[in-house]
Image: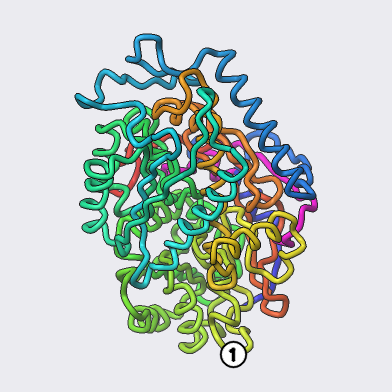
Amino acid sequence: MRGKRRFAAATTVALAMVATMAACGGDDSDSASSSESTATTASAGSSTTAGSTATTAAKAQPASMDDWEKLWADQRAAQLKQIKDNKWGTSADGKAVTGPEGFTMDLSKCPAGWSQTEGLTDTEIKIGAPTPLSGTAADSGNWTRGAGAWFNYQAARGLFKDSLGKTRNVNLIMKDDGYDAARTIPIVDELMDSEKVFALWTLGTPSGLKIYDKINQRCVPQPVLISGSPAWGDPVNHPWTSGSLLSYSTDAVIWGAFIDNHIAELTAGDGKATIATLIANSDFGATYDSSFRAVIAQSPNKDKIDYVTEKLEITAPTVTDPMTTLASKNPDMFIAMTGATQCPQIINEVANNGMKQKTKFLFFPSVCKASSYISKDKVGGDGSQSNGWYIVGGGFKDFNSEAAGADPFIAAGRKILADNGLDYKTSGSLGQGFYFGWLWGQILAVAGQMDGGLTRSNVIVAQRTIDGTSPVHLPGIKINMDGNADAYNLEGSDLSVWDAAQQKWVVQGDIIELSGKSKNCSWDVTAAACR
């Protein structure tokens, strides 16, 4: 593979494209040092910059846990003041909910017997969490375990004390669905009907698409769905559901911008750029695939691009057969559109089948950012087979990098995991789980301080007005929403490359921050795209 080059230019092109297409297809130094955030606008249907580019330095992150806690408290106070000043929340008659930018919910449509406080007691908040705890996708369940450790830490600090004086813990009810949507459906039914949970936390695009209609009809909060499908950006038709990861469509847009920026190198042999992808055979992979096809269709270099694909169940034990087929195509660039244990398997297959030597650029998906997918401990030997792999990393810090220990939050986070019987070295997903736990915590804390205390509709208003700083994301990455105007929690990312010698991801160019630029999405399941 070739070395690092021209990433700042690629970032600028990506921003221009994302401004028109994100969501609907239309130096990870592990420190708190400043990075830059760039915002670019583009004309509709164009991949060229139409407006000016604004670059501002990101603020340094807090230098201690006390400083982090003060920052979050200040952010919650500002959010709560905004809610109260604008009189957002549930109407006096209990029938309507209002929020920013025209956000509304009609509670009269909730089912008979529905309760604002079902799943709450004076001492606990019951959150149901179908999650893969077994099978080839089991590592994803560590996101939920990490969040659970964070809930315990924050509950001990009294974060979940509401305006009615009730102080609660989070009872996170994890049930193994094996990343199988057919298993998720009855688990969700059990959690709503038997466990009578206050809210739901689900993981994965395939299961999410199977259950979010039902969850919204039942008026049960689902505010931190662990998936990057743009389908969750639908505050009008699915107001009870929000996603939490970088949209897979944004991944695709940045891949396309990278190709356009490197088209001369990619076509140097025969005038064609052969782009090969291994796609998860599910709604998760289909979203990546359809988004990337839309990007290629709008590229000025579309006639120079040959797109070749192979599909594989994400639960398949090995990736050898489809990767052998893709290697036979002699691709100029390879992109993994799958996840979990298949990420390190792909690295080793590429090293063994000749692609590492011949393919100019190799890309990981954003869901495999952690060292635990790419480090020498995972891929074996000296880890050199991972060197030079690229990723659109969703802005995550690498919680498992040795150098990350200098980060005050990561140092504290590792201790929190240990206090809960969890070893951060076993999975990068444990540390990333603090993002989801932190987001849930901010939402629950703000909702609890709203008029009426903690209720289901207050949770949604708190979600739709969130504006805070995640401790496990790089400086310059924002976590925010704005009612009907901005339906995505996370719209920023890094573009990074793996340095095997240092055993860490290294950011190339500027942080890409696009808050408020992703379009809302009414999802078409058949087309695997926004309508």
Is 210 on the left or on the right of 3, as rendered? left
Is 370 on the left or on the right of 73, as rendered? left
Residue hosting label 1: 381
Q: Which contiguous range is marked in magenta? A: 16-43
195 drawn magenta: no
34 drawn magenta: yes
Q: Residue at x 71, y 61 (%)?
A: 411
Q: Is residue 235 above or below residue 23?
A: above
Q: Residue at x 48, y 58 (%)?
A: 143
Task: Out of 260 and 311, give the one closest to the viewer.
Answer: 311
Which corner quadrant holds the N terminus?
bottom right
Q: Is residue 401 above or below residue 492?
A: below
Is 210 on the left or on the right of 148, as rendered? left
Mark 1 neighbour density, 10 Å: few (under 14) some (14–19) many (20 or more): few
Residue 272 image offset from top left, x and y in percent? 48, 69
Q: Secondary structure at mark 1?
A: loop
Q: Is residue 47 visible?
A: no
Residue 67 image offset from top left, x and y in percent? 76, 43
Mark 1 is on which residue type?
Gly
Q: Is residue 185 visible?
A: yes
Q: Residue at x 31, y 55 (%)?
A: 283
Residue 390 image offset from top left, x and y in percent? 59, 67
Task: Out of 519 and 393, give the one closest to the viewer.
Answer: 393
Tell me the chief SS of the magenta region. Answer: loop
Task: Out of 236 and 96, give the one closest to the viewer.
Answer: 96
